[in-house]
Amino acid sequence: MPKVVGISGSLRKGSFNTSLLRAAVEAAPAGMSIDQRTIHGIPLYDGDLEAESGIPVPVRDLKDQIAAADALLLVTPEYNNGIPGPFKNAIDWLSRPPKDIPRVFANKPVAVMGASPGRAGTVLSQNAWLPVLKTLGTCLWSGGRLMVGGASKVFDASGNLVDDEVREQLKKFMTGFGEFVARASR
């Protein structure tokens, strides 16, 4: 059974992206498990902090979870047409020290999706992740894109996915990613 670590890149309690991650868990194909993770508790990257105290416990724990997983699912917001600072900061910490990059990221199947109140979804944020993921040596699944626009109408006030069209797109996305992970695991 492929084990996927899914990370919502939002800190907001009512995050559309955290809601999308929860919906992805429900839409995952049979045999795929998704361990939902958060970036809460990860401090701003500071080389002095790293030199003095080492890798913070929340970063170390998340690194170990990603390294043990078969794949990684990044659920990204889009802030000012790009990658959200807190999410990029978390990935930067996860790449420390550089000798750990192969253990955590090398050839790791990765998919990126996201939700936004705007019409275009998270297309610019997802595009901005591409060079970062390439630099880390991941194996990016490019067989599908899921950019949920108009998220305030797609999720209800409790964060439940209420749009049937998006639900079907999510199922197709997760099925494709599951097939990609299975092929990569052979």
Image (cartoon, rainbow, N blue to C red):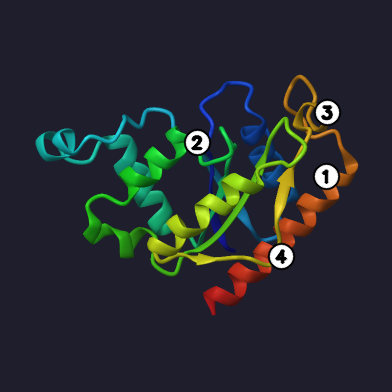
Q: Residue at x 67, y 70 (%)?
A: 179
Q: Are marks 1 and 3 in contact (CB under 8 Å)?
A: no
Q: Is residue 110 above or below residue 170?
A: below
Amino acid carrying label 3: it is Lys
Label 1, label 2: how far apart the Cα atoms are: 23 Å
- State the separation of the CA atoms marked 3 and 2: 22 Å
Judge left or right: residue 141 versus residue 83.
right
Q: Residue at x 64, y 58 (%)?
A: 32
Front of the two marks 3 and 2: 2
**Residue that carries the numbered disc 1 in the rendered image:** 166
Indicate the amino acid at tag 2.
Pro
The disc, 1 or 2, on the residue closer to the chain's N-terminal end is 2
Q: Which residue is mark 3?
A: 153
Q: Sort mark 3 into few (<14), some (14-19) or many (20+) by Cα contacts within 10 Å.
A: few
Residue with the mark numbered 2: 84
- Look at discs 2 and 4 and give the one toward the viewer: 2
Q: Which mark is residue 176?
A: 4
Please rate how many residues cluster around mark 1, counting C-alpha atoms within 10 Å: few if below 14, some from 14 to 19, many from 20.
Answer: some
Q: Residue furthest right?
A: 164
Res. 22 image quadrant: top right
Query: Residue 185, percent across and down?
Result: 53, 74
73 on left or right of 136: right
